[in-house]
Image: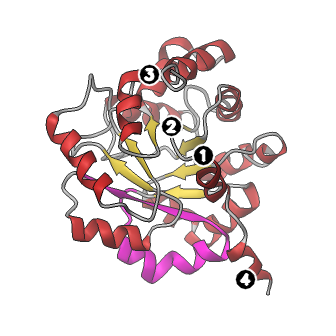
Amino acid sequence: MNNIAKIDTMNRIDELFRNKKKEILSVYFTAGYPLRNSTTEIIRELVSGGVDIIEIGVPFSDPMADGPIIQHSNSTALKNGMNLKVLFRQLRNIRKDVDIPLIIMSYINPLLSFGMRDFCRTCEETGIDGVIIPDLPPEIYIEEYKSFFRLHGLKNIMMISPQTQNKRIREIDRLSTGFIYMVSSSSTTGIKKGFSKEQIEYFDRVKKMKLKNPILIGFGISSPETFDIACSYSEGAIIGSAFVKMIREDGAGKNYVRNFTNNIKKNMYK
């Protein structure tokens, strides 16, 4: 009975999308960057800055989907001694004053090294709401790991890209929980000046499919303008490289983080 209760408990991600239908801002950063002990400070400053979801990246030696900015943050975080065990220790008390959804983004190798069952259990104990695993095929998730995720009330956020065919998108929508991470382009993460005609056509194609899961668009969101365009085709957008670049150049202090988030959100209430 206890396990059933866990499965049926409303997840913070579900609550967010139930209560807020548009202009959801999710921000990614790499745990342990720029300093080993920066993680909880950055989370709290992002909450103060009004973000809706925080994605905490687990550093990995070969982040194949990421561009040079996030690659550099991964390399630095690893040199700083960051890993999953350290991250969970740092997050042990985070739910005392942080109540927005927290998501871990990781390639699968660090999770397998930690042990997937133990990882899901520790996520629940820590207060993590969901996981994004770019290199985990949906079919493998369903066959091998879905039961662990359900037992511990954890969302598995799946990804689509411009190359994903409609039939496959429908299947991912059926298998997904929480929301769908819509990758805006087939390139790696990074700061882009805007969206191409092909990208806009892709956004429009998926929007017209009226999927059951909410969608957040990521990759190339770096300004109020790109955030605004992404939000016109989805429930919100994910910012990664632009925020990590800001941390590298300006630091993770309150004023810098708040100025960054306020700048991104400045078109929201026009």
As for residue 253 lying within the magenta part, the answer is no
**Horizontal relation, residue 33 to residue 95: left or right:** left
Q: Nearer the viewer, mark 4 or mark 2?
A: 2
Report which residue position mark 2 lands on.
Answer: 23
| Mark 1–mark 2 distance (CA, rounded to whole Å) | 8 Å
Which class describes the residues within 10 Å of circle 3: few (<14), some (14-19), or many (20+)?
A: some
Q: Regarding mark 4 in the picture, which secondary structure is present there?
A: helix
- Residue 127, position as x, y percentages in the image: 72, 55
Question: Which residue appears at 66% of the width and 34% of the height?
Answer: 43
Q: Nearer the viewer, mark 3 or mark 1?
A: 1
- Residue 103, position as x, y percentages in the image: 58, 50
- Residue 182, position as x, y percentages in the image: 35, 50
Task: Give the residues in magenta.
Answer: 134-161
Report which residue position mark 1 lands on.
Answer: 20
Do residues under tags 4 and 3 come within 8 Å of each other at their CB atoms? Answer: no
* Three-letter code, disc 1: Lys
Report which residue position mark 4 lands on.
Answer: 4
**Farthest left residue in view:** 198
Do residues under tags 1 and 4 come within 8 Å of each other at their CB atoms? Answer: no
Look at the picture and state if 3 lies above or below 82.
below
The N terminus lies in which quarter of the figure? bottom right
Question: Which residue appears at 44% of the width and 34% of the height?
Answer: 240
Is residue 206 visible in this depiction of the protein?
Answer: yes
**Horizontal relation, residue 269 to residue 50: left or right:** left
* Three-letter code, disc 4: Ile
First in sequence: mark 4 or mark 3? Answer: 4
Which class describes the residues within 10 Å of circle 4: few (<14), some (14-19), or many (20+)?
A: few
* Three-letter code, disc 2: Glu
Q: Which mark is residue 245?
A: 3
| Mark 2–mark 3 distance (CA, rounded to whole Å) | 22 Å
